[in-house]
Image (cartoon, rainbow, N blue to C red):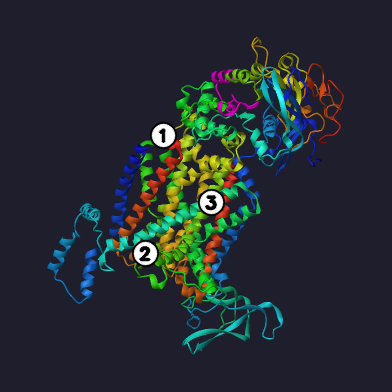
Amino acid sequence: MLNYIIRRVGYLFVTLIFVMVIGFVIIELPPGSYLEFELQRIRLLGGDLSQAQIKALEIQYGVNDPIYLKFWKWISRFVTGDFGESFEYNMPARTLVFARLPFTIIISVLTLIFSWTVSIVVGVYSATHRRTALDYTITVFQFIGLSVPAFLLALVVMVFAQRTLGLHVGGLYSDQFVNAPWSWDKFVDLLKHIWIPIVVIGAHNTAWLSRVMRSNLLDVLGMQYVQTARSKGLLERRVIWKHAVRNALHPLVMVLGMSLPAIISGETVVAIVLNLPTTGPLYFRALLQQDMYLAASFLVFLAITLLIGNLLADILLAWLDPRIRFE
Amino acid sequence: MEAKTANGQPPVLSINNLKTYFFTDLGVSRALNGVSFDVPYGRVMGLVGESGCGKSVTSLSVMRLVPKPGRIVEGSIIFNRGERTKDGYKVIESVEMTELEANGPKARSIRGAEMGMIFQEPMTSLNPSYTVGNQVAETIILHQDVNRREAMDRAVDIVGRVGLPNPADLVKRYPHELSGGMRQRAMVALALSCRPALLFADEPTTALDVTTEAQILDLMRELQGEMGMTIVFITHNLGVVAQMCDTVGVMYLGRIVEMADVETLFYDPKHPYTAALLRSIPHVGSTTKERLAPIRGVVPDPYATINGCPFHPRCDSFMPGVCDAAVPAETNIGDGHMVRCLLYSDKGEVEDNG
Amino acid sequence: MTEAVPTLPREELIAEPVSEVGLMSQWRLMALRFRRNALAMIGLIGLIIGYTIIALAPFLGPNDYLRQDSNYVSGPPTPIVFHDQTGKFTLRPHAMAITTELDPVAFKFKYVKDESTYHPIKFFVKGDPYTLLGFIKSDIHLFGLDAPNRVYPFGADPLGRCMMTRVLMGGQISMTVGLLGVAMSIIFGSIMGTASGYYGGMIDDVMQRVIEIIASFPTVPLWAALAAALPKSSSTFTPLHRYFLITVILSLVNWTGLARQLRAKVMSYSNSDFTMAALAAGANDRRIIFIHMLPNAASHIIVVAALAIPGMILGETQLSFLGLGIMPPLVSWGALLKDAQQVSVVLQQPWLIIPGVAVIITVLLFSFLGDGLRDAVDPYSI
């Protein structure tokens, strides 16, 4: 087991290097450079620079350096915690990333827990009550959940809440708590708000996972060992939960690697509509404004979050399925 | 009620006119269409037949494990609960299995404790997520008043008795670490962990190679004598039948068409189907010029209804106007030899599927 | 238990096949299973209708999709009734007139229904000129009002453009993005998946790592980053170029799923008897891949492709919603929804969400189709 984990961590670092390369490419892809942006800003402020001054700045920023040297400079600064400057906000990208990332992680993890719990319960129910009215109803909701883009669902929920309930549901806190220091009241207020993004972001994933769970469980229920369990005289409930569900779960853990990126994706987009203080709104704005150091930092950190999530999923899978552990 | 049978022992299992149908979207499939037989204590009853003849459904019906959309529609299954004494089996209670709730407490207390089952596929009949010991001990904890430790000790004991090496270590292994033969031994251990009076073995050696097959059969014979078990042995392999069984029932399309003790059946088959089955297998001493005779045609669609004897379309002794008119009834031709064929009796069944 | 099953004569019972199912080819069997699936057929027929509608979009829409009506900025949908001024029932639908009024309090123009004026809706009327299917020039619309009145069945956007025509035109982009993108993913994914599954070893290792790296990014942010790197619109880089590159970007991330599934299939085929037989018969790699493996995997490729289309459509919708996808003058459903980013706007002009309904219906139909195809190809996978 320990060997397995060490090997996975090794993979993680290899992947991480490539993630950094892609992050770097993203910075370099758009036409124009950091320096040009700076010059524009200075000119805008009314200043002017001589050719020699520009030359000096070019050397300082390494504009004409070969690409590998640029990469090396960027990555060596990155690992020391210097992610570059955000032009738009005129502050280190690091400050902005670390202010926003925790909320993305918290919401994503909560969404994951929510959608797993619901999809296991719903999946088990609909697999064991196949072709009943409730199973068909669940199927209808699953199809709808799979077809509605999360941001649209967010819009509909907000409009509904505002129009029929008269509630303002955007954000994570009520107005009076936004800038307040942490307190029990603020925490309760957070709980009152956070379930909406969780349900909205999780809807798609829940619909998908519960379908996966249903079909996995149906497969497993047809397995010989389920019949063996029944032939022991076990309670049907125990046959389902101990013998069938346990085996239906590991394909679900395997798709965890796919549902995590989907959740983070959904979170970033939904955050714009729901006005959440997470990475999404800032990241997409940075892309639109070509604020590339900020955008790249966000992207790299989203990827790192995912990589760690996948590592945990792999470990969970190995724990669940002895065949992988002894591979 | 306490009818004595051939060997002077009461029947452990007594099935009468059992009908189990599957109600599918395509129609009604009559998997069992009037099956009757008794299995005396300490005997091995063989059920043979081609795929789809209802062998497995018989055992599932008795265990009350018929999967949906199947249902027992008629007939009775009497299971005699009892205890094994020096001079045989003492019946304590006769349970009508068909009247029990399939997943009710009584059916469950019988399943696994007094009736065990071994399945065909050793590769898939053990749960891949739990150790062998866990799975064996689960049955023991369920049916016997023991704690986890004691259950595990008993599991080690039974795993040793089925001939698995180093049982104390083996119970900690997962099924995928064992070979097919070892898994089937583990499955035998699991089925026998509570010393059931009745064991169903559903093609337990079909998926194994010949050497392993012989070992498993020996093991089952040995444990049968040792534990005083009654076995219903389901197979399509007549060689295995000859080796294992005392009595044999030949099934065709949900009915037993011939039943006799194993010697009689092999040397004096009466039903044309039995005779054809026997002709279709090679035997030692046959000359090279002798060709094996396959049975003509295929087993008909289970949804189709055939007038008269279900075997008549494939039968060599077909009598026009007779065999396609009436369904032959069970005819006793002496010495516990039963046959359903109009060659031996002109009695057709009164009520039937027509 | 009397069953209406016909009893066959003895001769026919001996004749081997009991039903003709055993004799059907693989493809005919799949077609049969597909036709029996009601949802799948709804998906197929619905999509055929959908594609017909978007092909005829400029004809079906009552106005030109770019025409800005400064008198009808953010105007509500025109109420359509089946009676005239006198309140008498007519078979011909009538459009209620809408007038603008200055709200003295908010000091804003607001639209008021004029319950006394009704314009009859005419069919095949002359209207804005358009080009159908890229070559048919016409100015006849399926329905409309006599000039100068105009009908806006879905209302108008904040620039006063007809939402209905824009939704129909947006379909031309949104409903083709998925097809094009998936087509590209298939080509890419098939090559990579087959190569990696068949040759294994180094090639397989490298591809597995590449897939892992791509999969380690959250999809939409990665798409967005790539889309943000596209050049700004100019004479050499038109919105149409952008549209094609967006589909490339979508498939660049999407091919991995297909490659992964195909790899698993090909690997299982590599160990199968028919491949062994072909190898023993002296077939070379190319022959085995193209003659023996791909035809066997074809049905799976189709299923995976059909199931990938909804993801592509939703991808485009999200990108354009963020302002990183399709650019004007082209419209897509996502681009139209961009106007509806603010809840306050949606509260005022709920008709801006109509493109979302179109997205949901299309994705739903594709899901039905994909599920139906999967069940038809592999009935045991449930």
Which amino acid type is marked by label 2?
Phe
- In this rendering, do the residues under marks 1 and 3 share a single chain? yes
Instruction: Give the labeled residue for mark 2.
Output: A284
- Pick the quarter of the image with the N terminus of chain A: top left
Amino acid type for the residue under numbered disc 1? Phe
Q: Position of residue A218 (x, y in %)?
A: 58, 44
Query: In the rendered view of the protein, which quadrant contains the C terminus of chain A?
Result: top left
- Percent coordinates x, y for residue C45 in the rendering: 61, 57
Q: In this view, does A158 lie above or below C179?
A: below
Question: What is the CA distance from the residue labelled 1 to the residue labelled 3?
Answer: 29 Å
Residue C252 locus on image (x, y percent): 40, 53
* Residue mark closest to the camera, 1 vs 2: 1
Point out the residue furthest to the left here.
Answer: A52
Going 30% across and 62% down the picture, which residue do you hit? A294
Query: Is residue A24 positioned above or below B145 on the image?
Result: below
Label 2 Cα neighbours within 10 Å, binned few <14 / some 14-19 / many ≥20: many
SS label for mark 2 = helix
Magenta region: B189-218
Q: Residues within 10 Å of mark 1 (few under 14, many from 20)?
A: few
Instruction: Please report, as a chain letter, where disc 1 is located.
Output: A
Label number found at residue A326:
1
Callout 1 secondary element = loop
The residue singled out by tag 3 in the image is A210
